[in-house]
Structures are given as C-alpha cells and as structure tokens.
Amino acid sequence: MDSTAPNSSSAAAVAAAAAAASASGNGVQGGTGGDRPEDPSKQNLAQVTASIQRTLGLLHQLNLNVSSFSSASQLPLLQRLNALVAELDTMQKLAEGCNIQVPMEVVNLIDDGKNPDEFTRDVLNSCIAKNQITKGKTDAFKSLRKHLLEELEEAFPEDIEAYRQIRATSAAESKRLAQSQNVLPNGDSNVKAEH
C-alpha cells in the first residue's frame, strides 16, 4: 500500500518547514525539560512541532504495520490509523493559533528533496546583488552632483556660494530639529536602551 507515502512526504515537508521556521531565529526552543518559550505564539509553535513529530512517528509505525500486514495485525493497524486521525485533528487545532508564513518556494524545495537553506542563500544573494546595484547608482549620483557643482561654480561662482550657504543653513536646521525630536540624521528614531 503506497497510500501512506504522499502523507509521509507532506508531513515531512511540514515538519521540515516548521523546523526551518524555528531554526530561523523565532526563539522556539526545542528539547525537553525546563525549556519554555515565553511568548504564547512560540509555545503554540512548539506544540505544533511536537504534534508533527508524533504524526511522523505514527506514519512510520503505520508503514511498518502495512509492510508486514497479516490478519493478526489488523487491530493494531486500525488503532494506529485512529491515533493518526486524532493526532492530525490535534495538529490542525494547534496550527490555527500559529501565524507562520512559509514561502511556497521553501515547501517546493522540501518536496523536491532539497535543502531549504538553498532558498535562504538565494534570497540573500539576490539582496546583496540589488544592494550593490543601488549603491552603484547612489555613488553615480553623488559623482554627478559633485561634477555639476564644479561646473556650475566655474560658470556662476556667486550663485553657487549662495547655494552652499542655503544648504549649510538647511542642514544645520535639520540637525537641530532632529536632535530636539530625538531623531537620528538618517530619519530613524533614537531609542534609549532599557537596563
């Protein structure tokens, strides 16, 4: 009976996605003992992850029962099927409290048997490339501005001096205003660290 194989693959994909989400820094602590996530959503995620692990264990036991099926093993098979249905119901109820978005690309990679870290690496490389392009454009505009100011200074020295005074006054006013509003020069808010 191959009907358990797709369920096993899907459950493995869900388990791997949950593990990837927990490993990506959302603070969920695996393991046993005194590890308790402080946030209810993190605790909920830990419960869902544990339910996924139990489901995978049940699927493995079902696979063993089906592969060595005999009429004597019919009752344990039915009991494990009922336990699987109950665990899937529990997992569904627990999952309603979790708000985790897993990109479909990650799920597809897992279904294809690939490592979801490839997706993270590709996204990171894409961001780095876009950042370099943006930095290049910014540097080009700075160079253009500098070149234009040099050319304008040769043609209109008095006007450029007035322009520079206006810019200096405006920059000083912006800095004073930012300091009075506790805002950094780049527009971010300056937040005091709590001790």
Image (cartoon, helix red, strand yellow):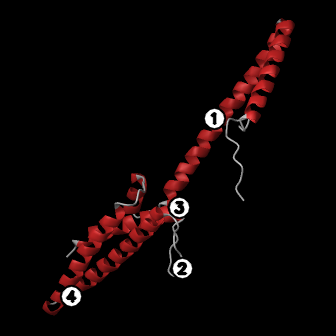
What is the distance, in whole Å, between disc 2 and disc 1 at their CAs? 47 Å
- Residue with the mark numbered 3: 26
What is the distance, in whole Å, between disc 3 and disc 1 at their CAs? 30 Å
Foreground: disc 4 or disc 1: 4
The first of marks 2 and 4 along the sequence is 2
Q: Is residue 182 above or below residue 98?
A: above
Foreground: disc 3 or disc 4: 3
What is the distance, in whole Å, between disc 4 and disc 1 at their CAs? 62 Å
Amino acid under label 4? Pro
Q: Which numbered marker is on residue 76?
A: 4
The first of marks 3 and 4 along the sequence is 3
- Residue with the mark numbered 1: 134
Disc 1 element? helix
Q: Is residue 111 above or below residue 149?
A: below
- Residue with the mark numbered 2: 34
Foreground: disc 2 or disc 1: 2
Disc 4 element? helix
- Callout 1 crowding tier (Cα within 10 Å): few <14, some 14–19, many ≥20: few
The x and y percentages for residue 37 are: 51, 69
